[in-house]
Every structure is written in structure tokens, then in C-alpha cells.
Image (spheres, helix red, strand yellow):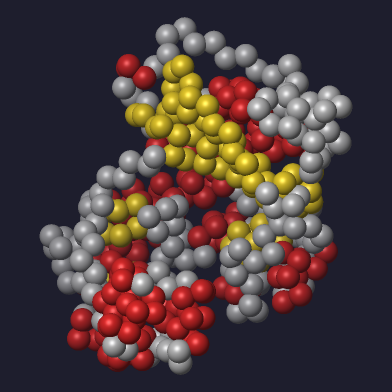
Amino acid sequence: MDAFFASVELLEHPELRGVPVVVGGRRVAASEAGKDYPRLKHYAGRGVATTATYEARALGVHSGMGLMKAALLAPDAILLPAHFEAYSKASRAFKAAVAQVAPLIEDRGIDEIYIDLTDVPGESLELARRLKETVWQATGLTCSLGITPNKLLSKMASELKKPDGVTILGLEDIPSRIWPLPCSAINGIGPKATAKLKGFQIETIGVLAKADPAWLVENFGRSYGAWLHEAAFGRDDRPLTFLRNPKSISRETTFERDLHPRQDRDELSRILLDLCERLSLDLTRQNYMARSVGIKLRFEDFSTITRDQTLPCPIADASSLRDAARASLRRVALDRKLRLIGIRAGSLVKGTDPSNLASGQRVVATSGLFTTEDNGSGISK
């Protein structure tokens, strides 16, 4: 999908089409009139950009960039808060639309899928047009497609003509279409590997393809070095995975400023409750329940701890997740400022299995999570 989160926001705010828009941060909202949107240059905090429109990307803003840094590049860009429920709804809609044309789908996240078109009637370009039209009719959103012999090339090809593009590649097109691209265009070659390759004067995929396989193994390790050689030639024999069973599902957030469990108790409680609600929606949407729940805390000195506990019966509702998080927090000395908090649902089981449903389970809601006790440990009752 093209700039997915930002594109969903533009459905709600069509007057912002054609201008730089960045999605991210907290407590940012449009005025009641719906016109006087906050500008990025007025932002102060430690939030990051969730996504950006192509107009903002042209100014150098990208996903994961700190909003303060983004403000230096695009000070007059509009800043909107993220609305994850709207994105999840649009995600389900576009995947259901694709399934009407091609039912064999590997789900790769909220905005990306692989599709097996082998047995779907029609030429490649015709299929691409059908898929794009089906998605547009269902969501009002555009997508970009790469149609190739394998997953590695399709991932690369889908990025070549964004937004709203179609790229069709065969193995014979690799020298002319793929080799001129930077090595970082290959999914799996990240910033560190890119920098190391650049240190060896290997900056394009074509130069990588000419590298001696034994030399790649020597310098990048047996597995990764061999993979680099295969990837440079567009070789990938991974099958599509049509059913994925996750081991865990988690939610976490980094705060705009460090928060103390005592002085900022109410805000920390609100944030963790919000994470529990989001995690509950994730579990419900995927029809899972959790037999274990864990918390993750990152302190102001960047040290990180986790605490997990196994539950007597599986849970999925927000209140039960909250109670499990409280129990884990009892095992932590909450006497330092926090940068990040997260919650994880593990040991997942399908929610439709009657054996997984608790009989007469009672959930008691609580008003807070963090205490104001002098030693900073424990939780409020």
C-alpha cells in the first residue's frame, strides 16, 4: 500500500492532499474547525514519525525519524496523530478485496502482502489492473505491485514505481533493471551491511553480483555471504506462507519525555491501559488468546528489563491483560524514570477452542497501575 497510514488519514482530511503531512506523536489534533492543523515546527518532544505523505518524503522525512529532526527538514508540514484502528480497518478491507481476485495470500503486516498468481487467469498487466481497481473500490486507496518469479524480486519491484505503480520483471530483466540499483534496495541489506559493502567499494547490486562468492563468505559470514551472492542475481526459492501462527503479539511505546512512576503515575497508567486495549484488539482481530503476559520497561539510562508470568487460563480482554501487567509490575522496583513501556501476549492459543475458554472467569478493574509508595515498588490496589 502507498504511504498507508498517511493515505488513510487523507481519506479523513481530503483538504490536505498535495501538501506535506507527517503522522506521529501524541496529543496532536486539528482544531474544531478542521482547518487550522498543527505544524511540525511547533512540535516539542521525543516522538517519531509513523509515516509521511510523499510530499513530506520528498523533503527528507521518513518513517522512524524523530519529529524534532523532521521539523528541521519540513517545518511547515502538517502533523497529525496516528489512528491505528482506522489503519487496521483499512488493512482488513484491502486484504479482503485482494482475496476476491487471488485467494492465496501471505500476510506480511498491516500494509503489505505477497500473492500467488500462478493459477489466476489473465496476463500479468491485466491482473495488476484488476487488483488495483479492486483495492481502490474497497478502500479508496492506491497500491503498488511488483509481479516477478519470486518474493525477493517482487518486494524490490513493488518499490520501483511508487506510488500507484506496476512493475513486471523476469529474470532476464535483472541486469538492466536490478543491477543499477543501490545494494540497500535488496530487502535484507540494512544500513550496517550497506555501509560495510560501501567500504569495499560495492555500492550497486551489479557490483555485488561481480563479487567473488568465496570473498563474500569470508567477509560477511557463511550464511549471509552466500545469501548476498544469490540475492544479487535475484534468486529466491522461499515459498509463500499462507498460514502464520505468531508466537507472541506485543505493543510498546517510547515516551516523548522520561516519566517517573510516582510523579507521572496517572500518565503512565493511562499509557499502559491504552497499550492493553490495543493489544486486546490485536488478539481479538487475529482470534488469539494469551497464556502468558509480560511487560517491558526501559529506563532513562537505556537499561531494559522484562517480567513475564504464566496465567492459569488464557486471556484476551483488556481488563485481564491489565491485571496481568499489574502482577508483573509488582516484581519491579519502580524508582527510576522510564523511557519506554511495553506489554506482550505470549504462548498464544486460538480463541475458538472451547478448551481455552475460562469457566466463570471474573475480571476486576482497577483505577491505576503505578504506586506512589516511597520505595516506588508495587502497584496500586
Asked if residue 118 lies left or right of residue 142, the reply is: left
What residue is at 21 percent from the left and 80 percent from the top? 170
Q: Quadrant of the C terminus?
A: top right
Say above or below: 304 vs 378. Answer: below
Q: Is residue 244 visible?
A: yes
Residue positioned most to the top: 360
Q: Residue furthest front?
A: 218
Does residue 207 lie above or below 358 as drawn?
A: below
Q: Nearer the viewer, residue 14 or 375?
A: 375
Against 240, residue 309 (above or below) is above
In this orientation, which residue lies closer to the viewer: 91 or 313? 313
x, y percent for residue 155: 35, 69
Residue 159 can be seen in this image: no
Residue 54: which quarter of the image? bottom right
Residue drawn at point x = 80 percent, y = 68 percent: 41
Question: Looking at the picture, how far across and down is residue 295, in whole percent?
Answer: 59, 36
Residue 82 horizontal/vertical position (percent): 63, 52
Viewer-nearest residue: 234 or 117 = 234
Expressed as whole percent of the image width and height from the top left, the position of residue 252 reads: 60, 45
Quadrant location, the N terminus: bottom left
Residue depicted at x 23% and y 62%: 238
Could you say which is closer to the camera, residue 246 or residue 58?
246
Residue 179 found in image quarter? bottom left
- Counting labels gives 0
Residue 4, compared with residue 210, is above or below; it is above
- Using the rendered view, name the quadrant where residue 8 is placed: bottom right
